[in-house]
Amino acid sequence: MFADACQRASEYTRPVVISTRRQDGSVSTECGTFIVLNREGWILTAGHIYNSYVKFQSDQNKIREINELNHSRDSRPGSPPKRIKADPAYITNHSFWWGWDGVRITNVFVNMQVDIAVGKLEPFDPSWVSEYPVLRSPDSLRPGTSVCRMGFPFMNITSTFDEETNTFRIPKIPLKSAIFPNEGMHTRDVMNGRTSDGRYEMLYVETSSPGLRGQSGGPIFDAEGRLYAMQVRTMHMPLGFHPTVEYDGKTVIENQFLNVGLGVHVRTIRAVLDERGVRYDAEEDSGGYRITG
């Protein structure tokens, strides 16, 4: 059912690799997903992709304050000899890899309440992407529709940090074998009100299958390959079953859950893109397409 749709979606679905180095020298790597929206290089992803960057900025301010305090103490006679040390968990270096070498992101807009981020890749060559998404008409979404999710789970990426060049290095990512789809059903719409500034509906599509770690920011699309929603998180619905099992001679009560996916509804996606002036292909009720923005 989704073979052609997956082929289309794989053209505009790309991985984002987030590398961080901490004060103690440890390096960690995470992977998410983003959607290339148009030939100008605008992209869409989950807002929480930026969580580590927000922490990095906060940690940099704290490190700067510590350095200033230590410098002030060094210049004052009779100051305590013991220097203030930065927390080993502070992030000292941070990097995004946006699907292609030498590409950075600009004009970034993040709304953490909705969990959405929009930005523009620079430089960007339109020939890198052979097909761009068509955003489905918001009023046409119905529970019971079969949908598919795509992203980059199961990625075991190990970054290294080059002290001399002050840069991260990541291994080559085999995109064709790394991209992973999983299908499900649109079960319900979830409305969490509006953002605190009143600008956007916090409207989500719930799916019967869970989003997998690494698929955040990736597309949820229908059998025609039209963008239906954007994956942001997985919810755990308690089933009320509490079976007992034995582990190493001990009886343990296990709580049973149904894991469901949650994606930002295309209605909210379009509202954000329209406000930012980002062009996209949109499905019209007439069955044709138009360029919006």
Image (cartoon, helix red, strand yellow):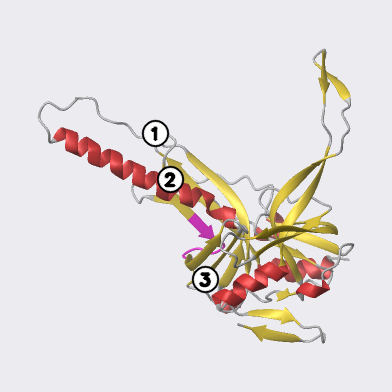
Q: Would you identify the image quadrant in which residue 113 lies?
A: bottom right
Q: Would you identify the image quadrant in which residue 186 lies?
A: bottom right
Please report the residue visible at 64 percent of the width from the left and 72 percent of the height from the top.
271
**Real-space Cα separation, disc 2 to disc 3, in angstroms:** 26 Å
Q: Is residue 70 above or below residue 249?
A: below
Q: Pointer 1: what residue? A: 87
| Of the pair 143 and 18, the residue shown nearer to us | 143
At label 3, the amino acid type is Lys
At label 2, the amino acid type is Phe
Q: Earlier in the sequence, mark 2 or mark 3?
A: 3
Considering every residue shown, the one lying at the far top of the view is: 249
At label 1, the amino acid type is Asp
Query: In the rendering, which numbered label is found on residue 161?
Result: 2
- SS of the residue at dot 2? strand
- Chain part drawn in magenta: 96-103
Q: Pointer 3: what residue? A: 120
Q: Earlier in the sequence, mark 3 or mark 1?
A: 1
- SS of the residue at dot 3? strand
**Real-space Cα separation, disc 3 to disc 1, in angstroms:** 34 Å
Q: Position of residue 285 (x, y in %)?
A: 81, 83
Does residue 188 appear to the left or right of 128 in the view shown?
A: right
Query: In the rendering, which numbered label is found on residue 98?
Result: none
Please report the residue visible at 62 percent of the width from the left and 54 percent of the height from the top.
32
Q: Position of residue 169 (x, y in %)?
A: 47, 51
Does residue 153 appear to the left or right of 257 in the view shown?
A: left
| Of the pair 147 and 206, the residue shown nearer to us | 206
**Residue 97 magenta:** yes
Q: Nearer the viewer, mark 1 or mark 2?
A: 1
Q: Nearer the viewer, mark 2 or mark 3?
A: 3
